[in-house]
């Protein structure tokens, strides 16, 4: 499928005035995407685990039918309180998807959203937020398109979410999701995410993610700005090549490899992401001193105790500790005894991936 397949075919047909609700989880990338081109298209392929507990829950309420004009007429609420500061980003999203969901201009509507994780926790909510919103919009389209197939709905939902936030296309469905065209991943696309279609050993299917909230402050630079700094970056092309090679390596690891190989690749990906930030122009550092302290303690714990555990990072200071079910008791005890002191407000979120 390509973008023309998702253009709305019957703009004169409007969904009913109603409440359309959905939810979408956050995801954590194992191979990172950093750098984009065109309209939210990735410069390299990425793959992510989908979390289960960290979610955004959203309702879109179509309140009144109106004569369509050049504007979108909506209000946004977070946890029941009006959030006009959210409108600019959502309005940009709506403009990008107008040709695919044109009926939105024919309504006054409200967006009500909330997260199952603390809003100020430092966990990026753009992926889950935009994914949940896209799912609501597709519920509207499905209500007037009874012939829509499940595959089409899944692909278009991911396609729309991508236009709100790139990584959101990995949060609309599936447990292990690939985004970006790659020669070794059949069916992969840069327009939407797909469920990983190959063998995965059971030991990689039941994983835990303990998120250590190192810093709740606003990031020094937004992810959008960070992605744009990859244009002209002296190491950009090599980084894109590295990521795509790691997709090939990870495919083999998931099928026949071990934990040592898995954690070596995932940790290298996390550090490569931050290396690109530190070597861009202008440069920036999103890790904090406590981030580095936690990483070093994880390495020491793994080596000295032989416990299967590793880490990854998003574009921020927080540390995601990844580990199989068998390591659960030892890792959580280690966090409580050795790492929680480095978390702001001693905050840790224990999540999981199961499929």
Image (spheres, rainbow, N blue to C red):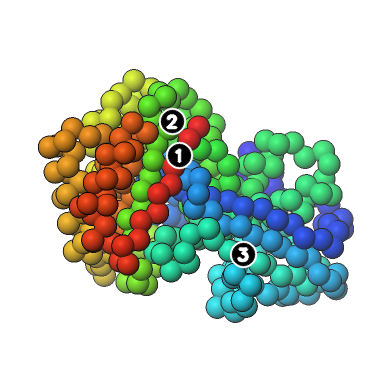
Mark 2, residue position: 205
Residue 157 in view here? yes
Earlier-in-chain disc, 2 versus 1: 2
Residue depicted at 84% across the width and 49% down the height: 144
Residue depicted at 77% across the width and 40% down the height: 148
Residue depicted at 74% across the width and 51% down the height: 139
Counting other residues with Cα less than 10 Å from the Cα at mark 3, is it few (<14), some (14-19), or many (20 or more)? Answer: many
Q: Secondary structure at mark 2?
A: loop
Quadrant in the picture for the N terminus: top right
Q: Gap in Å between the C-alphas at discs 2 and 1?
A: 7 Å
Q: Secondary structure at mark 3?
A: strand
Residue lying farthest to the top in this orientation: 256
Earlier-in-chain disc, 1 versus 3: 3
Asked if disc 2 and disc 3 are in contact, CB closer than 8 Å, the reply is: no
What's the mark number on residue 214? none
What's the mark number on residue 353? 1
Q: Gap in Å between the C-alphas at discs 1 and 3?
A: 23 Å
Mark 3, residue position: 113
Q: Looking at the picture, how far across and down is residue 24, in whole percent?
A: 58, 51
Asked if disc 1 and disc 3 are in contact, CB closer than 8 Å, the reply is: no
Question: Against 198, is 136 above or below?
Answer: below
């Amino acid at each position: 499928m390509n973008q023309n397949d998702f253009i709305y075919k019957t703009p004169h047909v409007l969904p009913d005035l109603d409440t359309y609700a959905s939810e979408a989880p956050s995801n954590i990338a194992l191979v990172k995407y950093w750098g984009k081109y065109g309209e939210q298209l990735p410069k390299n392929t990425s793959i992510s685990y989908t979390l289960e507990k960290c979610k955004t829950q959203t309702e879109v309420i179509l309140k009144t039918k109106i004569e369509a004009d050049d504007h979108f007429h909506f209000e946004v609420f977070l946890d029941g309180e009006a959030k006009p500061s959210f409108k600019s980003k959502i309005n940009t999203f709506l403009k990008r998807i107008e040709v695919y969901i044109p009926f939105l201009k024919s309504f006054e509507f409200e967006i009500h959203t909330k997260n199952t994780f603390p809003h100020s926790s430092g966990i990026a909510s753009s992926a889950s937020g935009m994914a949940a919103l896209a799912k609501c919009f597709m519920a509207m389209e499905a209500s007037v398109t009874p012939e829509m197939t499940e595959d089409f709905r899944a692909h278009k939902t991911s396609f729309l979410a991508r236009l709100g936030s790139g990584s959101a296309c990995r949060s609309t469905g599936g447990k292990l999701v690939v985004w970006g065209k790659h020669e070794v991943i059949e069916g992969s696309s840069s327009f939407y995410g797909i469920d990983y279609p190959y063998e995965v050993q059971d030991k990689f299917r039941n994983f835990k993610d303990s998120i250590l909230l190192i810093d709740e402050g606003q990031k020094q630079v937004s992810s959008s700005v960070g992605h744009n700094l990859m244009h002209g970056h002296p190491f950009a092309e090599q980084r894109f090549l590295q990521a795509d090679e790691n997709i090939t390596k990870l495919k083999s690891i998931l099928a026949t490899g071990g934990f040592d190989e898995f954690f070596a690749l995932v940790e290298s990906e996390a550090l490569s992401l931050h290396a690109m930030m530190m070597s861009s122009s202008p440069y920036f550092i999103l890790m904090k001193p406590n981030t580095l302290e936690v990483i070093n303690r994880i390495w020491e714990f793994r080596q000295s105790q032989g416990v299967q555990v590793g880490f990854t990072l998003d574009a921020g200071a927080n540390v995601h500790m990844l580990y199989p079910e068998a390591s659960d008791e030892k890792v959580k005890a280690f966090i409580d005894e050795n790492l929680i002191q480095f978390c702001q407000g001693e905050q840790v979120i224990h999540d999981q991936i199961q499929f």
